[in-house]
Amino acid sequence: MTTFESKATIQQPINKVFDFLSDLNNHHKLMPAEDIQNWKSSYDEASFSIKNMINLSLKVESRIENKEIKIVPAEKPPFGMELKWELAADNDQTAVAFTITADLNMMMKMAVSGQLKKLAEHETNSLVFLFS
């Protein structure tokens, strides 16, 4: 398994950040707009295409209030993967860690590692921007 992680601190209370991340409708705001196409979402599921790369359909597997949100494929992707948001309260701010774990063979690792690392960083940076 290959892991891509990005961390940030949000200047908002944990319940506000958790509520935002719990709704997959909001995740479109975290994605790099130039790379995402055909976005469709509900509270629990989202499907989209990453330009020149992959079509994905994701669903929330679990939510632990104010702690963690696990997102997994709703349909079989080209490789196994899990997305996880972990939150921790720190006074009136929230520490977040976004992790993408992917089961990549050597060829896929060479092809998509840079984009997945960039995606993880973009999502946490977008979250910071949205709450600033």
Image (cartoon, rainbow, N blue to C red):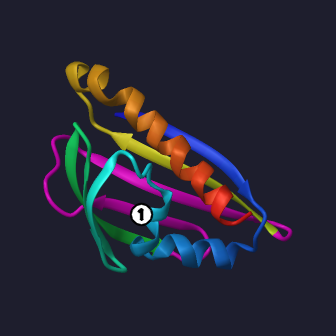
Residue at 61%, 49% (x, y): give it. Answer: 125
At numbered mark 1, what does the secondary structure look like: helix, strand or loop? Answer: helix
Q: Is residue 63 above or below residue 93?
A: below
Question: Left of 16 or right of it: where is 2?
Answer: left
User: Please, what is the three-letter code of the amino acid marked with disc 1?
Assistant: His
The x and y percentages for residue 55 are: 19, 50
Q: Is residue 108 above or below residue 122?
A: above
Q: Is residue 116 magenta?
A: no
Question: Left of 77 or right of it: where is 93?
Answer: right
Question: Crowding at label 1, few (<14), some or many (≥20) Cα neighbours within 10 Å?
Answer: some
Q: Is residue 10 above or below residue 7?
A: below
Residue at 76%, 70% (x, y): give it. Answer: 12
As drawn, which residue projects farthest toward the right?
91
Of residues 87 and 113, the one nearer the viewer is 113
Q: Magenta region: which residues?
A: 64-92
Where residue 51 sits, quadrant-wise, is top left
Question: Left of 49 or right of it: where is 113?
Answer: right
The x and y percentages for residue 115 are: 39, 33
Question: Left of 109 or right of it: where is 88?
Answer: right
Q: How many marks?
A: 1
Residue at 21%, 20% (x, y): give it. Answer: 107
Q: Is residue 75 magenta?
A: yes
Residue at 37%, 28% (x, y): give it. Answer: 113
Q: Is residue 104 above or below residue 126?
A: above
Q: Circle 1 sits on which residue?
A: 28
Which quadrant would the N terminus be assigned to in this image?
top left
The x and y percentages for residue 82 are: 35, 51
